[in-house]
Image (spheres, grey):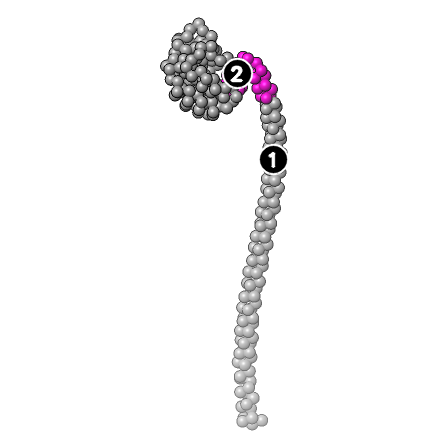
Amino acid sequence: MTRWHLFPVLSLLCLSPFAQAESTGEKVLQLQQQMAVMQGELSSLVAVQQASKGSQSALADLLARTQRLEQEVRDLRGELDTKTHALQTQQQALTAQLANLTSATTSTSSTAITASNAALINSAAVIASAASNTSAPTIQGLGQSDYQQAFDLLRQGRYGSAVTALQGFIQRHPQSSLVPDAYYWLGQAQYVLGQNDAALKSLDTVQTRFSQSSKAPEAMLRMAEIYQAIGQSGKARVVLDKIIKRYPSTPSAQKAEAQLQALPAKK
């Protein structure tokens, strides 16, 4: 073989290692690129898995909270049912007590109306009973007819009309000997109508202007009862003490002493 023929062969032999190296480098680069892609995919898979685990954990936590809330609702419903039953039982008991009390009060009221010295049940019943048991005045005072008409209205329980008639009698016959009685019954009727201030004023007129009248101590006793009824026990005590001092050794004084003992103790 000539030298010229050997030259291409030698050239190929010299270039072969370099070519092989370049091919290997390309494969390494390709492998590195593939590994980078795979690492990216692996990271994505790991992130997805972690997110999936987080979602599952959050879902499990939400489920547990929901179950706890459902249990609390069941507990509250049970407690509500228990309280509702207890309230219904109490209401039934109160209804029964009220029915018994109403029956007892009705029975007591009937007894009070027929008895001459029955205890106070209510102001209207007491005044009607007292008026019915009071005979017409033996002293023929001025304006006797007008007074009798007003007094009859009181007996009938027509308290509004009685107030108007008694006031008219007092205005027309201020000098009549029946005026103290008119003021006394006027105060009684006004109290029944809920006119407490007017009632106290009318009754006070009896004991201030007509202190010698037989109605004066009775008017004061009634004033004490009204004060006590409206929660002014202190004023009731003052009036009762005044009765005892002004009318000693009388039935009115004895009543006043009994009422004083029944009043709540001073604080």
Front tag of 1 and 2: 2
Q: Nearer the viewer, residue 7 or 170?
A: 170
Residue 18 image offset from top left, x and y in percent: 53, 80
For the image shown, how many numbered marks are present on the structure?
Answer: 2
Amino acid marked by disc 2: Ser
Question: Is 46 contained in the magenta span?
Answer: no
Q: Nearer the viewer, residue 149 or 193?
A: 149
Asked if residue 56 lies left or right of residue 238, the reply is: right
Q: At 56% from the left edge and 58% from the top edge, which residue is drawn?
A: 51
Asked if residue 95 lies left or right of residue 225, the reply is: right
Q: Nearer the viewer, residue 162 or 18?
A: 162
| 3D distance between C-alphas at marks 1 and 2 | 51 Å
| Start-end of magenta stretch | 104-133
Quadrant position of residue 77: top right
Residue 153 image offset from top left, x and y in percent: 49, 21
Q: At 55% from the left edge and 60% from the top edge, which residue is drawn?
A: 47
Which residue is denoted by mark 2 in the rendering? 132
Amino acid marked by disc 1: Thr
Which residue is denoted by mark 1 in the rendering? 84
Q: At 41% from the left edge and 15% from the top edge, which residue is drawn?
A: 142
